[in-house]
Image (cartoon, rainbow, N blue to C red):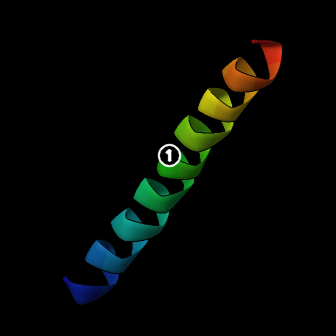
């Protein structure tokens, strides 16, 4: 079970990075 949680955490980190990149793009346009 521990390995499954680690895999999920890695996916969550990637998702958070994508949200930060999208926010940065909007700020650049403005």
Residue drawn at the location 47% of the way across and 68% of the way down: 10
The image position of residue 12, as x and y in percent, is 41, 56
Classify residue 22 by image quadrant: top right
Residue at the location (58% across, 50% down)? 17
Quadrant assignment, res 23: top right
Quadrant holding the C terminus: top right
At x 70% / y 24%, what residue is drawn?
27
Q: Nearer the viewer, residue 13 or 27?
A: 27
Horizontal arrangement in the rendering, residue 17 relative to residue 26 (left or right) = left
Q: Is residue 4 above or below residue 15?
A: below
* Residue 6 vertical position relative to residue 18 in the rendered view, above or below: below
Q: Position of residue 16 (x, y in %)?
A: 48, 49
Say which of 23 and 7 sits in front: 23
The one nearer the camera, 1 or 12, is: 12
- In the picture provided, is 14 more to the left or to the right than 8? right
Decide if residue 30 is on the left or right side of residue 16: right
Q: Residue tagged by mark 1?
A: 15
**Residue 13 on image: x %, y %:** 48, 60
Graded by Cα atoms within 10 Å as few (under 14), some (14 to 19) or many (20 or more), the crowding at tag 1 reads few
Element marked by disc 1 = helix
The residue positioned farthest toward the left in the image shown: 1
1 to 21, vertically: above or below: below
Q: Residue at x 56, y 54 (%)?
A: 14
């Amino acid at each position: 079970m521990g390995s499954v949680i680690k895999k999920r955490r890695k996916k969550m980190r990637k998702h958070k990075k994508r949200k930060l990149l999208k926010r940065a793009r909007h700020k650049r346009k403005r």
